[in-house]
Amino acid sequence: MNTTFENNIHNSQQDKVIRSKVWRAGRSSGSALLDMTDRSESPVQLMVLIAKQFPSRNTVATTKEDSRKIAEINFDPLDPAIDHILKDGITFENDTVKLLPCRAVPLIRL
């Protein structure tokens, strides 16, 4: 499995934190990749949630790799929101789970 679980010791409720491990290039240097596989929400529902929590994002694109659901969230590379999403992740109102995206692998052109 490509995600790891750990407890967040900063909250008294001990939220479950799911760190995304997605190894692929993004569409821009301001891309963050989010593994949504373990969530029951549809990609559209997750896109709406991301839009509410991070209104400065440029775009959100979803894709599937075998059974994995992945979202690429694009920010302006100078937007501080990319650091915020990488540190604090996406939160859900219904439960104590946080999804933490990872930074996309830089695209290297030869």
Image (tube, rainbow, N blue to C red):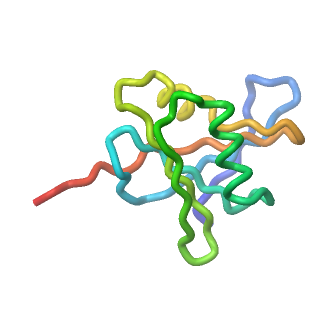
Image coordinates of residue 64 in percent, x first then y, are 56, 70
52 vs 110, nearest the viewer: 52
Q: Toward which corner of the image does residue 9 lie, by quadrant?
A: top right
Q: From the viewer's perspective, is 20 left or right of 105?
A: right
Q: Toward which corner of the image does residue 98 lie, by quadrant?
A: top right
77 vs 47, nearest the viewer: 47
76 vs 15, nearest the viewer: 76
| Residue depicted at 10% across the width and 60% down the height | 110
98 vs 2, nearest the viewer: 98
| Residue depicted at 73% across the width and 33% down the height | 8
Q: From the viewer's perspective, is 90 left or right of 64?
A: right
Image coordinates of residue 5 in percent, x first then y, are 70, 49
Image coordinates of residue 36 in percent, x first then y, are 66, 56
Q: From the viewer's perspective, is 18 left or right of 59?
A: right
Specify the farthest residue to the bottom. 66
Q: Is residue 93 above or below residue 84?
A: below
| Residue depicted at 60% across the width and 56% down the height | 35
Q: Is residue 89 above or below residue 40?
A: above
Q: From the viewer's perspective, is 73 left or right of 13?
A: left
Image coordinates of residue 11 in percent, x first then y, are 80, 24
| Residue depicted at 68% across the width and 33% down the height | 52
